[in-house]
Amino acid sequence: MKKINFSKIIMIALVMLIAACLAILVSSKNFKNSKNPSGMTVVINDAVGGIDGLIAAPFDALKDKANDLGNLMETYHENASLSKQVTKLTDESSELDSLKAENKSLKAALDLQNTLTNYEKISSNVIVRNPNAWSDSMTIDKGKTDGIKVDMIVMSNGGIVGRITQVNTTTSKVALLTSDKALENKIPVRLGSAENPAYGLITGYDARQNALIITQISSKVKFTKGDKVVTSGLGGNSPSDLLVGDIIGEKENTKSEDRDIYVKPASKFDNMQFAFVIKRGLNVDGTAETNE
């Protein structure tokens, strides 16, 4: 392998350095005398300029890359900041929706309370509603110490939602009308007009139609779609005239000569936060009815 002759390289570099210095001197002299640079000066200047360009090129490229990296980091920080803002706005939106839902529930509870002035009632909060038994039951935060008894009617969101089936010291279990455990939900009701009433029992729920099913109708009276259904007061701890819902249709019962009346519930069962347990009705003079 041929060895590199460093002495020759050093000599060439010295010659180029001397030539560059001479070119600078000549150029400055010509500049002072307002003369055009000589041909050698032009050649040397071009060569030096080319070498300077070659040397500067990597540094210029590195500078561009540094600028690109800086822009990328700035974009990253901007995206991170925007992401935090989006998360914050999402949380605030969820909190606002929750507050709106709670406000709606409070308004519904207040409206219901205003319609129950003729009843002795116990206000309560829904504290447990198991997703696995969402349609069957819920637990409220009132019990024996508050005067709660088994079979008392429970109302929420504008109408009847169920009845008390289990009472503890400070809590009670409510069997909902939407439960498929029909025996726990039998509530006596009155249908039709006050002049020509008919009586029956809430015995089931049709989830497909979102309708309560009333059977064992006491008469053959004809009902009109939209007729109100209320409690009859004939069932022990079931005061009369509590709103159940509106009639939406009927059909013949294939298992008996009876007919099934379908009633759209006045209450909404999907979001119950507050509930009223009806202890008894009140007479005009404010005394309790003897219906227990």
Image (cartoon, grey):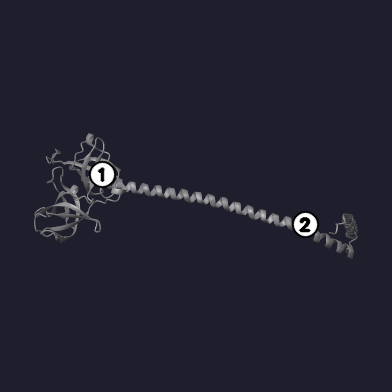
Position of 82 relative to 34 (above/below): above
Report the quarter where the C terminus lies: top left
Position of 188 relative to 143 (above/below): below
Residue type for callout 2:
Ile
Q: Residue at x 79, y 58 (%)?
A: 52
Disc on the earlier residue, 1 or 2: 2
For disc 1, the neighbor class at 10 Å (few under 14, some 14 to 19, many from 20) is: many
Name the disc covering residue 2, or none.
Answer: none
Horizontal side, residue 223 vs residue 43: left or right: left
Horizontal side, residue 285 vs residue 99: left or right: left
Q: Quadrant of residue 116?
A: top left
Q: Quadrant of residue 13?
A: bottom right
Q: Secondary structure at mark 2?
A: helix
Q: Nearer the viewer, residue 65 or 21?
A: 65
Q: Position of residue 66 (x, y in %)?
A: 67, 53
Q: Position of residue 171 (x, y in %)?
A: 26, 38
Q: Is residue 202 visible?
A: yes
Name the disc covering residue 275, or none.
Answer: 1
Q: Position of residue 163 (x, y in %)?
A: 20, 45
Disc 2 designates what residue?
A: 55
Q: Secondary structure at mark 1?
A: strand
Q: Position of residue 221 (x, y in %)?
A: 10, 58
- Tell me if label 1 and label 2 are in contact, CB under 8 Å: no
